[in-house]
Amino acid sequence: MKTAIVSYSFTGRNDRVAEIISEKLQIEHIKITEKKQRTIMTAAWDVMLGRKPKVAPSPDVIDQYDLVIFMSPVWMGTAASPLHRYLIRVKKTKKDYAYIALSGGGTEKNPTLKKNVMQWAKHEPKAFLDMHVSDLFSDKEISNDEIQRYQMAEEEYLVFADRAITEIEKIL
């Protein structure tokens, strides 16, 4: 099965986890980039207005794969907006996909995230995982601001990559 992991990352965290997954599973890693500079405010406006920013590479790059694993942060309870054009492509091609999120803000799970992803793709992902940087601090109270500023160590990226690989291997 020809598989790729497609990631978008505002801080670099999701891209680093996707790189590790790509290396360990020996699958291609495609990084989504944006045409315009991203800020916290443009992220919020994208979510509130349902905007789909211009991205590279073109979403049709996923057409050559049997399974596409998407990885992105979660913004205001929804998949990061740069991913939307790719999920719409999934809908058009009826492609098998998985979705993995690593959120840097908040300590709560995102109860509507899967429904949101399915709204764009129009069918259920083969695997779904909602991870949070705050999972690293389950033994102590930590603020959203501390979570957002936290600099992850390589072994912490490996923890998240291993969690994701466990789910991905179930569908490969």
Image (tube, helix red, strand yellow):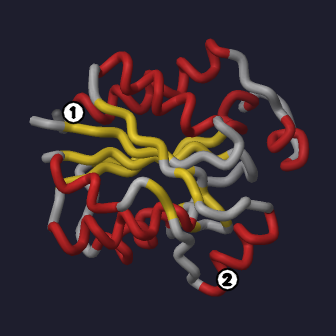
Judged by depth in the image, the label closer to the viewer, 2 or 1, is 2
Which quadrant is home to the C terminus? top left
Pick whichever of labels 2 and 1 is earlier in the sequence: 2
Which element is circle 2 on?
A: helix
Q: Is residue 154 left or right of residue 44?
A: left
Q: Is residue 87 left or right of residue 109?
A: left
Q: What type is the residue that disc 1 sits on?
A: Lys
**Residue that mark 2 sits on:** 48
Q: Determine the residue located farthest toward the bottom in the rendered image.
A: 49
Of the pair 158 and 131, the residue shown nearer to us? 158
Picture mark count: 2
Q: CA distance from mark 2 to mark 1?
A: 35 Å
> Which quadrant holds residue 132?
top right
Judge whether 100 appears above or below 96 on screen. Answer: above
Judge whether 37 appears above or below 131 on screen. Answer: below
The residue depicted at 59 percent of the width and 23 percent of the height is 157
Residue 9 position, x and y percent, is 60, 46
Residue 125 position, x and y percent, is 28, 57
The residue depicted at 65 percent of the width and 76 percent of the height is 46
> Which quadrant holds residue 116?
bottom left
Q: Is residue 119 left or right of residue 149?
A: left
**Residue that mark 1 sits on:** 170
Q: What type is the residue that disc 2 sits on?
A: Met
Q: Residues within 10 Å of mark 1 (few under 14, many from 20)?
A: few
Q: Determine the residue located farthest toward the top in the rendered image.
A: 155
